[in-house]
Amino acid sequence: MKQFQKTGSLLLPYRFTRGCPFECIFCISSTQRLSHALLPDEIVSHLESLQGEHHPTGFFFLNDTINISKKYIMDLCDKIIARKLKILWSDCARVDHLDQETLFKMREAGCIRLIYGMETASPRLLKYINKKIELKDLENVLRWTDEAGIWSGVEVIGGFPHEKQEDIEATISFLKENEKYINRIYLNHFDLRGNSVLYNSPERYGIKRIFRVDECTEKDFSSYVEYGFDEADGLVWKDKVKQIEFSIQAIRESCCRGHRFFTDEHLLFFLYSHFDHKDDVKSVYLKILKNHE
């Protein structure tokens, strides 16, 4: 930690796609779709220039989904490797278009972390939000990600409309069963986002009386809620708020102990810049985490 604090760590944000080709109903990209993606040659030229000018520890890619297709991500990785561009990077990805070959190629091209948007492990809610992923496929991808030496994060949302106790339990069970392949859980309160499919077609998804609340959740400053709503034939907002918090707390207490660390991103890049193998990174990371509990 002394070396980390003295050396400093520079992460450059970089985005090369706009929108998302998938249609999860809670996301604003569900109504915007994929509108632009830079060509791999152009991306690599940008990265090479930024690397030469700023010498960052790594690049924090800000795409909604880096693997918009298998061909796109493979072409990008091939060009990074061919250009002998020694960089470290992380991004968000979907289970779609990912296999063992692709993940190992991504690691070779400098990928050190991928964050997967699982959201929930309830088959009923996955269908409700139009996630279009199979949990078995996610299990395989998490295992392959670990085998490739890439740090894996999983996004989870607590308190979807009409979420039941059995849905929460399904998520907890999945996280526990795949714990050895999941390095970080990103736990988020559900918030209804303007211009999402869910916001634009509330009756279709069983919600009503949408209104502005503009507040941060009581126990988590980072979670901002813009709109409140009632569930049709379900909870009114004052009770829904309690249910969302209950869902978050249940998952946090069961699965998220030791997953948050205030220097997580910068520290992770720093460790990957010093160690070639994920096992070494994980060993040092866990020791540091334990000392800061």
Image (spheres, rainbow, N blue to C red):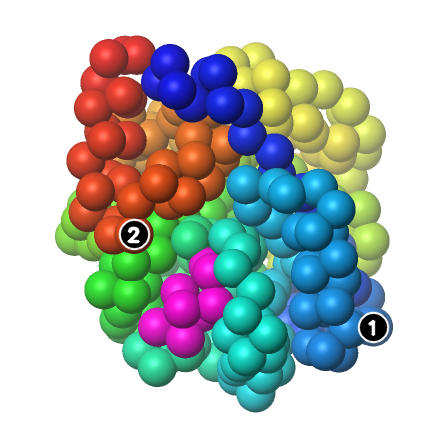
Q: Position of residue 235 (x, y in %)?
A: 55, 36
Mark 1 or mark 2: which comes first in sequence?
Answer: 1
Q: Is residue 155 magenta?
A: no
Q: Are marks 1 and 2 in contact (CB under 8 Å)?
A: no
Q: Secondary structure at mark 2?
A: loop
Question: Which quadrant of the structure image shows residue 27?
Answer: bottom right
Mark 1 crowd level (few <14, some 14–19, many ≥20, 10 Å Cα): few
User: How far is disc 1 from disc 2 in space, using C-alphas?
Assistant: 36 Å
* Residue at x-position 59% and y-position 79%: 79
Q: Position of residue 120 (x, y in %)?
A: 41, 53
* Residue at x-position 37% and y-position 14%: 2
Decide: is 30 above or below 271.
below
Circle 2 residue = 276
Visible residue check, residue 39: yes
Decide: is 246 above or below 79.
above
Q: Position of residue 200 (x, y in %)?
A: 80, 57
| Horizontal side, residue 105 vs residue 229: left or right | left
Decide: is 228 above or below 151.
above
Point out the stretch of residues depicted in magenta: 104-111
Q: Amino acid at mark 2?
A: Asp
Q: Amino acid at mark 1?
A: Ser
Q: Nearer the viewer, residue 182 or 176?
A: 182
| Horizontal side, residue 256 vs residue 17: left or right | left
* Residue at x-position 82% and y-position 53%: 195
Q: Position of residue 151 (x, y in %)?
A: 35, 50
* Residue at x-position 46% and y-position 59%: 111
The circle on residue 35 is 1
Visible residue check, residue 139: no
Quadrant showing the C terminus: top left
Residue at the limit of the structure toward the bottom, as seen here: 71
